């Protein structure tokens, strides 16, 4: 979920709504258990389109949530959906990140 650094706080609600609109029905229609994970990513994650990558991967995998830059130079967010799909979000992260 890639927003310019200065606009992250303002645009985050729109990005959240965009993800929810696109994936909520798919995530909620599962018969399996749902999972919600809060996360914070450290390292060089700002200025490299990490949020855009995360949003694209979430859309491909079929999970919902939000992601934003923090004032500490990290990226924080939440991912929700079927347990197996949420778990696969972790394994889809590039090795360099």
Image (cartoon, rainbow, N blue to C red):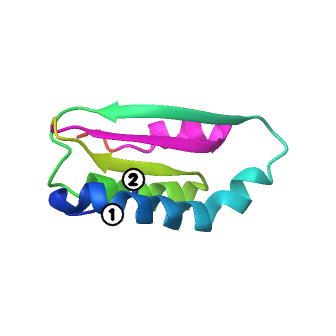
Choose between 8 and 74: the one closer to the eye. 8
Residue for point 50% across, 67% down:
18
Choose between 56 and 19: the one closer to the eye. 19
Residue for point 60% across, 67% down:
21
Say the numbered circle drawn on residue 97: none
Tell me: residue 43, above or below residue 58.
above
Taking 45 as reference, is 86 left or right? Answer: right
Q: Earlier in the sequence, mark 1 or mark 2?
A: 1
Q: Is residue 80 magenta?
A: yes
- Residue 15: image quadrant is bottom left
Taking 59 as reference, is 40 left or right? Answer: left
Residue contact between numbered discs 1 and 2, judged by CB atoms under 8 Å: no
Residue furthest to the right in view is 31
Residue for point 38% across, 43% down:
93
Distance of label 1 from label 2 (alpha carbons): 15 Å
Structural crowding at the residue carrying mark 2, measured as other residues with C-alpha within 10 Å and reported as few (<14), some (14–19) or many (≥20): many
Secondary element under disc 1, as helix, strand or loop, is helix
Residue for point 32% across, 44% down:
94
**In this figure, which residue is indicated by the disc labeled 1?**
11
**In this figure, which residue is indicated by the disc labeled 2?**
54
Residue 54, x across and y down, in percent: 39, 53
Structural crowding at the residue carrying mark 1, measured as other residues with C-alpha within 10 Å and reported as few (<14), some (14–19) or many (≥20): few
Tell me: residue 72, above or below residue 57.
above
The quadrant in which the N terminus is found is bottom left
Residue numbers of the magenta segment: 73-93
Residue 91, x across and y down, in percent: 46, 38
Q: Is residue 54 magenta?
A: no
Labels 1, 2: front one: 1
């Amino acid at each position: 979920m890639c927003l310019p650094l200065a606009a992250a706080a303002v645009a985050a609600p729109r990005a959240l709504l965009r993800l929810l609109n696109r994936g909520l029905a798919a995530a909620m229609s599962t018969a399996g258990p749902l999972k919600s994970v809060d996360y914070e990513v450290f390292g060089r994650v700002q200025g490299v389109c990490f949020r855009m990558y995360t949003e694209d991967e979430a859309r491909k995998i079929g999970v919902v949530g939000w992601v934003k830059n923090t004032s500490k130079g990290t990226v924080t967010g939440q991912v929700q959906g079927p347990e197996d799909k949420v778990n696969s979000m972790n394994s889809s992260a590039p090795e360099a990140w």
